[in-house]
Amino acid sequence: MVDPKKAPATELRSDRRSLVTASGGMIFFTSDTHFNDPRILRLGPRPFSSLAGHDQALIELWNETVAPSDEVWHLGDFAKGSAETVSSLLSCLHGTKHLIIGNNDGVVTLGASAWASVQHYKELTVEGSFLVLCHYPFRTWNQIGKKSINLHGHSHGRLKPMTRQHDVGVDAWDFRPVTFAAIQARRRRG
């Protein structure tokens, strides 16, 4: 079982090499939080005894890791619930939040006004690397021959890693968002 407190937020925020946003913040990636979704406690090995405990722990870990001036790309499967529930969740999470649509993101999640952007797919450059963001892992992707990198969610840390492809879901990253520098460091170690 993963200990959600294992990686201290100071370690995760200490690498200031991560691309700094216009507001002076860092860029983070995450996926598959499944806030307010009771199925998540049955589907995966998450170490929480209740949905309320799950949601509270993920909120605390997010806010220990992400500062208000940071930017977060959430690669899908954010939350279930009413417009009020989704809006409340988004308002208590630090950072400017972008959503890459996942298979469990309903109309209410997609329509929440707190998202800075909502899309199925995004390409962006971080720390000189061309990133392809999607909820789903790809077999091939744009500029794969030029060493581009696919960041995805959906698989809850269960897929065997491929070269230049990384699951950024909370199940793979101690239940908190992660910087690109941390993703690259794990790749070099592993």
Image (spheres, rainbow, N blue to C red):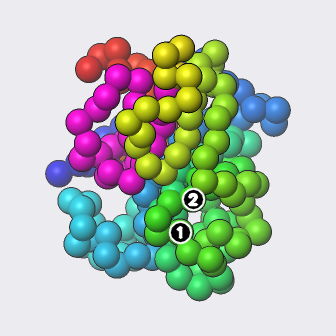
Q: Is residue 12 visible?
A: no
Q: Three-letter amino acid code at disc 1?
A: Asp
Give the amino acid at mark 2.
Ile
Residue drawn at 40 percent across, 76 percent down: 37
Residue 108 in percent (x, y) is at 63, 78
Q: Position of residue 187 (x, y in %)?
A: 35, 21
Q: Secondary structure at mark 2?
A: loop
Secondary element at image label 1: loop
Is residue 151 visible to the viewer in this orientation of the structure? yes
Q: Residue sitting at 43 percent across and 57 percent down?
A: 32
Residue toward you, 124 or 85 = 124
Q: In this image, 174 relative to 108: left or right?
A: left
Badge 2: residue crowd in 10 Å (few <14, some 14–19, many ≥20): many
Q: Residue furthest right?
A: 22
Residue under pointer 2:
101
Q: Nearer the viewer, residue 119 or 189?
A: 119
Q: Main secondary structure of the magenta part?
A: loop
- Few, some or many C-alpha atoms within 10 Å of disc 1 (few <14, some 14-19, many ≥20)? some
Disc on res. 105: 1
Is residue 77 positioned above or below 12 on the image? below
Mark 2–mark 1 distance (CA, rounded to whole Å):
6 Å
Above or below: residue 53 compared with residue 81: above
**Residue at position x 17%, y 51% in the image:** 1
Residue under the image location 50 percent in, 32 percent down: 141
Left or right? Give the position of 163 relative to 97: left
Mark 2 vs 1: CB contact within 8 A: yes
Part of the protein shown in magenta: 149-173
